[in-house]
Image (cartoon, rainbow, N blue to C red):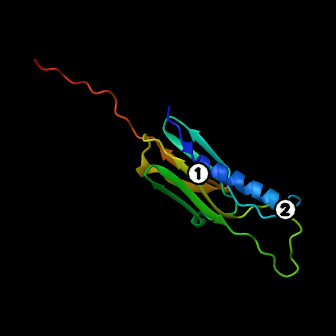
Amino acid sequence: MSQLFYSPLSTLNHLHRDFGHIAANPLSSTRQETFSPAIDIRESEQAYSVLVDVPGLEPDAIDVSLHQNLLTIKGNREAETPTGDNSFRRRERASGAFSRQFSLPDSTDNEAISAKTHNGVLEIRIPKAVTPGPLKITVNG
């Protein structure tokens, strides 16, 4: 069974950033978080599906690329800026740029990868390559 791998460095970077926020202002409830979308990965016999929560992002604000079996998902959710007397009392919705990377196994059909959004969820479908069955070779005498 093949697996999709993620980059552990991105998790460590998020942890380091969170500790920095806590040390800088431990009682703040209005600090601005960095946006990092939640991701699920499913596997079937035919394909992998990467599901990314991207509510509020238009499809043209999301960049999906593949280079040397490294799938990269990038985007940017703009922070809403208050205008006039419309100021924030509390901000919990995270915004900012994000980038997530996953190593794809060699058994994927990279030419057939597709991506679409629906109801705030980006789905990247990564078909598995068709592997030929055993080949019978006749031995001549």
Q: Quadrant of residue 77?
A: bottom right
Mark 1 or 2, which is nearer the eye? 2
Image: 12 above or below 82: above
Q: Residues within 10 Å of mark 2 (few under 14, many from 20)?
A: few
Q: How many marks?
A: 2
Image: 53 above or below 107: below
Q: Quadrant of residue 81?
A: bottom right
**First reached walking from the N terminus: tag 1 or tag 2:** 2
Q: Are marks 1 and 2 in contact (CB under 8 Å)?
A: no
Which percent across, then down, holds residue 89? 89, 68
Q: Estimate the spatial distance between the alpha carbons at disc 1 and disc 2, rounded to whole Å.
A: 36 Å
Disc 2 marks which residue?
25
The label on residue 1 is: none
Disc 1 marks which residue?
123
Quadrant showing the C terminus: top left
Q: Residue furthest front?
A: 23
Amino acid type, residue under disc 2 in the picture: Asn
Q: Residue at x 66, y 50 (%)?
A: 12
Which percent across, then down, holds residue 45? 50, 34
Image: 129 above or below 24: above
Q: Residues within 10 Å of mark 1 (few under 14, many from 20)?
A: some
Q: Is residue 16 left or right of residue 23?
A: left
Which percent across, then down, holds residue 84? 85, 82
Describe the element under mark 1 as helix, strand or loop. Answer: strand
Say which of 8 and 34 sits in front: 8
Say which of 138 and 67 sits in front: 67
Amino acid type, residue under disc 1 in the picture: Glu
Which percent across, then down, holds residue 85? 88, 80
Q: Is residue 141 left or right of residue 37?
A: left
Describe the element under mark 2 as helix, strand or loop. Answer: loop
